[in-house]
Amino acid sequence: MSKQFAVIGNPIEQSRSPELHHAFADKTGLDLNYVKRLAPLDGFESSVKEFFAQNGVGMNVTVPFKEQAFTLCQQLTERAKIAKAVNTLWMQDGVLHGDNTDGQGLVDAIQALDWNLAKSSILIIGAGGATRGVIYPLVKAGAQKIVIANRTLARAEQLVSDLKTAVPDAELSACGLDELQGQFDIVINATSASLSGDALILPENLQFNYAYEMAYGKPSSFLDQAKARGVPTSEGFGMLVGQAIEAFYIWNGVRPKLKDFL
């Protein structure tokens, strides 16, 4: 019988996780079934328990349940503890385990583009959960300096103070969007500006070599501005595939090659 997996969220229709995991299974010769599971906003915990009670093996968690998944887990990986959010669940010896593979997905996507992370300086625009989840993996991959820029400066400063002890080897700092300047290797847009259609204006005195947009499949004024400067860009599909590969590896012990699916 094939192993059972699911992605849980609300809404869930847009998720591409099932097609990715079935493609990984085809490539690696594994037999699995991966479905979308819509949970009521007030019924996440019972949906998770029901899934694992019915011999479910692993579950991905998407918006808006990642923080709730974090509080449900009895065992967490280091990167999940730092992210304070979980996107990958599995049951082991009756204990619910949680990990956050988003940050590693971003790192793998950037490395697949051959953008160098060793000793890099990175600007991340946005101070939400997506940013919190990627700092630790970026530093582990070699980022030396990370500036978090946010419309509300206090929120970026809070994130820096929360994460400083987790990444002692890196220089972490915060600034307001109106203070954007300087020279960076990579600028990452972790805001929902491209999704909401809000224009994010990049000032002339902000210099960068590469631009990464975490969202994918939507017009992005951030990427348009980078392209206008002749800067190499990428949208977030690689990150989506990367985080899915990392979850697949945790559950199945086999790691498909990212470049095969980009």
Image: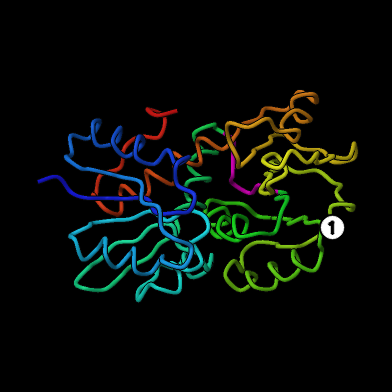
Residue 116 sits above or below residue 142 on the image:
above
Locate residue 110, reporting x and y percent.
Answer: 55, 39
Q: Main secondary structure of the magenta part?
A: loop
Depth check: give the residue in front, 13 or 120: 13
User: Residue 89 occupies which quadrant of the picture?
Assistant: bottom left
- The tally of labels here is 1
Q: Is residue 223 one of those drawn in magenta?
A: no
Residue 73 sits above or below residue 108 on the image:
below
Q: Amino acid at mark 1?
A: Gly
Look at the image and give the residue range highlighted in magenta: 115-122
**Residue that appears at 39% across and 44% down:** 244
Locate residue 29, reporting x and y percent.
Answer: 18, 34
Q: Residues within 10 Å of mark 1 (few under 14, many from 20)?
A: some
Depth check: give the residue in front, 179 or 139: 179
User: Residue 70 occupies which quadrant of the picture?
Assistant: bottom left
**Residue that appears at 37% across and 50% down:** 7
Determine whether the residue tagged by mark 1 lies in a helix, strand or loop.
Answer: strand
Depth check: give the residue in front, 212 or 136: 212
User: Residue 94 occupies which quadrant of the picture?
Assistant: bottom left
Residue marked by disc 1: 176
Q: Is residue 117 one of those drawn in magenta?
A: yes
- Residue 31 is left or right of residue 99, and the answer is left
Residue 135 sits above or below residue 158 on the image:
above
